[in-house]
Amino acid sequence: MMTSQSSGKQTSNFAPWFKSTWESLNLLNLPSAVLIHGQSGIGKFEFAIELAKAILCESAAPLSRPCNECEACHWFESANHPDFIALVPETHRKLLPHGDFDVEADSSKKSKAISSDSDGEASEKKEKKNISIEETRNAIEGLSIGTHRGGSRVILIYPLEMLRSDSANTLLKSLEEPPENTIFILLADRLDRVLPTIRSRCRLVSAPRPDRSTGLEWLRNQMALVPNSKFSSAEIESIYDEQGGAPYAVLQSLIARHHQDDKDELTIAIQASNNLLRAMSQGARIEWLDTAEKTQKARYSTLLSTMQRWTADLLSSAQMGHPRYYPKHEAAIQTLAKQARMPKLLNFWKSLVHARRHENHPLATRIQLEALLSQYQQIFED
Ligand SMILES: [Zn+2]
């Protein structure tokens, strides 16, 4: 699970501000239904996962936390424990142990491909936010059968508010006559939206919200696990306050932005390099002002390395060699190599090498880009 590690997700742990909540639950004497409620994004799902794992743990010694070593713990971590049933909508599945990040990325790509005003996407989105009726029915019907491993069985439902009324009625029947060895862990962001008849049959557990400094400290630690995180401490702080102090929600949106920016930057770099190559292949006819304008959004270092490769290809072709970097443009490169004034071409190469030494200077880009491209044009003129 490299993806989940690198995105700072911890599947087998809960946030420090849940410590006393954990201690208040007696694992050896749990009621058949626990309803954990509280603000969205403070970590109650992660807490519930750890609780489910602890209930199913088969360690001989009575422990307060799952042992992470027994067979049951391994089954749980690999999302294969037969007595753990999670009824969560598709949008929340990535939070489960072994949640598949790639599947999530794929499905978001797919929904983006559909135009935003189409009804299809709206209903598809709505469907993804709901807990499947079929899954609920299958899960509840399966409760009459004994557990697979002869121990407990855990049914986790989140968000309980998203359970449709027919499914809620089925659930209610099971809560009235709890099947043997079965523990329901129910989660709700809004307790007032849960049916009172369901509420009254559960032990209510209020999920705590961390104080600002605890939440921020946790968030900074999580972000430190994200390779090349682009967010400063001050940025993290302002987003945290903006999102009402829900650390898990902030973490999710920071990671999403982190990946989004990567993608955007890559797209910009590719487009800029293509523009630059097209312009440079024009030789003396290059429209350097226009090219600088079109490519300036890309990193200066990216543009410089494209120019450097192109120039290296020109130099090697001028010396009867072949282009090494852009063989696709060999015809244009050969033609330009013949037109180039050698001393000017060598000077341009020196300018590029010099520019690369200062490429991280904040004032780089536009003006220097224009200067370099105009120098490039002069290579082909007397
Ligand atoms: Zn265990």
Image: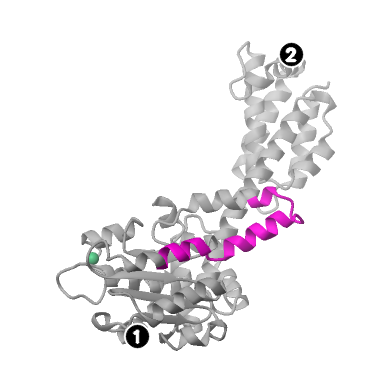
Q: Which secondary structure dominates the residues rendered in magenta?
A: helix
Of the pair 239 and 102, the residue shown nearer to us? 102
How packed is label 1: few (under 14 Cα within 10 Å), some, or many (20 or more)?
Answer: few
Q: Residue at 33% of width from left, 68% of height from top?
A: 144
- What count of labels does the image hold? 2
- Please report whichever mark, 2 or 1, sits nearer to the chain's N-terminal start: 1
Q: Farthest residue toward the left?
A: 60
Where is residue 140? Give x, y as percent.
Answer: 41, 68
Residue position marked by numbered label 1 in the rendering: 20
Vertical placement of residue 265 versus 55, above or below? above
Q: Residue at 23% of width from left, 80% of height from top?
A: 28
> In this orientation, does residue 1 appear?
yes
Residue position marked by numbered label 2 in the rendering: 338
Find the magenta span and give its range. 111-140
Whether residue 43 sits left or right of residue 339 in the image: it is: left
Q: Which mark is residue 105?
A: none
**Amino acid type of the residue that numbered disc 2 sits on in the rendered structure:** Lys
> In this orientation, does residue 17 appear?
no
Where is residue 26? Give x, y as percent.
Answer: 27, 84
